[in-house]
């Protein structure tokens, strides 16, 4: 978590009135500490932030959540922890992509598998380079 927080740029003008405001603070790109931690597969950081009440469904400027960023990085452990702390496995970003789609289109099949094996995550069918992927097992 130290690595995650060290990237945060707080100024003397920032005023926080609760721990929730701190853990959900977004940088100029809309990234929260949880999003940054997930992208680095820092499962411990995501866990600590989740316990502190971080909102795992906040979106950055591209509409990506903890789930999207973890799937893009094939960060399976951070992905699992994010899901345990309420991250929506069906969330769509600005392009309409879910974490499962991001996992499959980036070749991060491990992340995609974590998502489609998660109860409540929608089954979907997508066509990629003439191949039909059915993530419903």
Image (cartoon, helix red, strand yellow):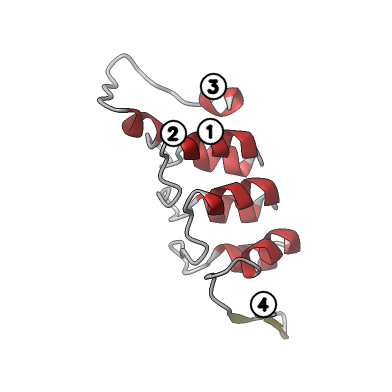
Query: Relative to 65, is 92 above or below?
Result: below
Which residue does the numbered mark 2 point to in the structure image? 52
Task: Write the residue at 67% across / 67% down.
Answer: 105
Q: Earlier in the sequence, mark 4 or mark 1?
A: 1
| Residue 15: assigned label | none
Task: Write the residue at 55% across / 49% down.
Answer: 82
Query: Relative to 7, is 135 above or below?
Result: below
Question: Distance from label 3 to label 2 (Cα)?
Answer: 18 Å
Which residue does the numbered mark 4 point to in the structure image? 135
| Picture quadrant of residue 107 | bottom right
Question: Distance from label 4 to label 1 (Cα)?
Answer: 31 Å
Question: Distance from label 2 to label 4 (Cα)?
Answer: 33 Å
Characterize the local packing of mark 2: few (<14), some (14-19) or many (20 or more) Cα atoms within 10 angstroms.
Answer: some
Q: Earlier in the sequence, mark 3 or mark 2?
A: 3
Q: Earlier in the sequence, mark 4 or mark 3?
A: 3
| Position in image of residue 123 (x %, y %) | 58, 78
Query: Which mark's residue is nearer the viewer, 1 or 3?
Result: 1
Q: Secondary structure at mark 1?
A: helix
- Which of the two residues, 57 or 105, is positioned nearer the viewer here? 57
Which residue does the numbered mark 3 point to in the structure image? 6
Q: Earlier in the sequence, mark 2 or mark 4?
A: 2
Query: Relative to 107, is 18 above or below?
Result: above
| Position in image of residue 127 (x %, y %) | 65, 82
Query: Which mark's residue is nearer the viewer, 4 or 1?
Result: 1
Question: Distance from label 4 to label 3 (Cα)?
Answer: 37 Å
Query: Relative to 72, is 4 above or below?
Result: above
């Amino acid at each position: 978590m130290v690595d995650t927080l060290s990237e945060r740029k707080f100024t003397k003008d920032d005023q926080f009135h609760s721990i929730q405001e701190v853990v959900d603070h977004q940088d100029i790109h809309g990234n929260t500490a949880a999003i940054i931690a997930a992208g680095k597969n820092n499962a411990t950081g995501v866990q600590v932030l989740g316990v502190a009440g971080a909102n795992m469904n906040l979106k950055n400027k591209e509409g990506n959540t903890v789930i999207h960023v973890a799937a893009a990085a094939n960060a399976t452990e951070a992905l699992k922890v994010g899901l345990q702390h309420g991250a929506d496995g069906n969330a769509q970003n600005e392009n309409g992509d879910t974490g499962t789609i991001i996992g499959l289109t980036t070749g991060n099949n491990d992340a995609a598998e974590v998502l489609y094996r998660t109860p409540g995550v929608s089954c979907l069918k997508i066509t990629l380079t003439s191949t039909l992927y059915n993530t419903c097992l």
